[in-house]
Image: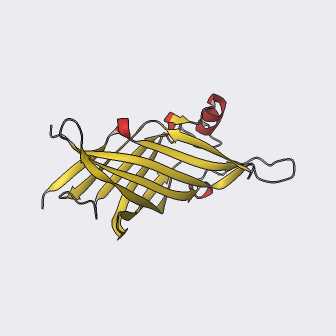
């Protein structure tokens, strides 16, 4: 089998996150700049080697002041840790079009193993004859495990921010063009 390299199509991909605020509502945000690739044996993605990098300074929550606070040392500390990286250790089919993606996530200088689910959305040629593959990646991480421990208390002594962060990434891959 021939090895193929696939790259994320940034025009047709997105990375979002959700966190509870005051335990009563959810705040949603996105990272607008990211890149990644997958190396496969042939066209199948099982056992693919996957790498993903996020530019943390591209965080966007529709609130400029909140985005600035998230970039500060209280949270991501982008001056010292400008990227979030992921390197897969396995990509295995668990049923039909559902895969388990395991790997090492590095955020704010802390590397931990994580597992997320990747649902295969299908494959299709675009208007130029290029094969595209789609996946929706979902999962949850605990922000405190990665050194994002800042939290304020409410008037009643409750925590202002939830610890669990829900992740949703809609990813479209296309075959990398040879140089």
Q: Residue furthest bottom?
A: 94
Rendered view: 16 above or below 166 = above
- Between 117 and 64, which is closer to the camera in this rendering? 117
| 37 lies left or right of 127 | right
Residue 131, given in percent of the width and then of the height, sits at 22, 46
Q: How is the image coloured?
A: secondary structure
Q: Quadrant of residue 104?
A: bottom left
In which quadrant of the rendered image does the N terminus lie? bottom left
Q: Position of residue 19 (x, y in %)?
A: 63, 49
Q: Residue at x 29, y 58 (%)?
A: 49
* Residue 142 picture location, percent across and down: 59, 58
The reply, left or right, for residue 117 in relation to residue 120 is right
In front here: 89 or 162? Answer: 162
Give the quarter of the image for residue 68.
top right
Instruction: Return the residue found at the far top.
Output: 64
Pinpoint residue 24: horizontal percent, then vertical percent: 74, 51
The residue positioned farthest toward the right in the image shown:
156
* Residue that protrudes farthest toward the left in the picture: 1
Please state which of residues 25 and 76 is positioned toward the viewer in this rendering: 25
Q: Quadrant of the C terminus?
A: top left
User: Looking at the image, which residue is at 49% across and 50% down?
Assistant: 168
Tally of numbered discs: 0
């Amino acid at each position: 089998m021939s090895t193929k390299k696939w790259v994320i199509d940034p025009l047709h991909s997105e990375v979002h996150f959700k966190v509870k605020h005051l335990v009563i509502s959810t705040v949603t945000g996105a990272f607008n700049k990211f890149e990644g690739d997958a190396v496969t044996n042939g066209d199948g993605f099982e056992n693919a080697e996957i790498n993903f990098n996020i530019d943390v300074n591209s965080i966007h929550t529709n609130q400029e002041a909140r985005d600035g606070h998230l970039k500060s040392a209280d949270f991501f500390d982008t001056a010292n840790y400008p990227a979030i990286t992921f390197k897969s250790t396995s990509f295995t089919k668990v049923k039909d079009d559902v895969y388990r993606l395991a790997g090492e996530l590095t955020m704010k200088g802390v590397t931990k193993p994580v597992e997320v689910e990747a649902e295969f959305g299908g494959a299709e040629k675009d208007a130029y004859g290029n094969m595209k593959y789609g996946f929706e990646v979902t999962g949850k991480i605990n922000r405190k495990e990665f050194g994002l421990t800042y939290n304020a208390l409410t008037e009643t002594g409750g925590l202002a921010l939830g610890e669990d962060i829900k992740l949703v990434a809609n990813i479209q891959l296309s075959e990398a063009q040879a140089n």
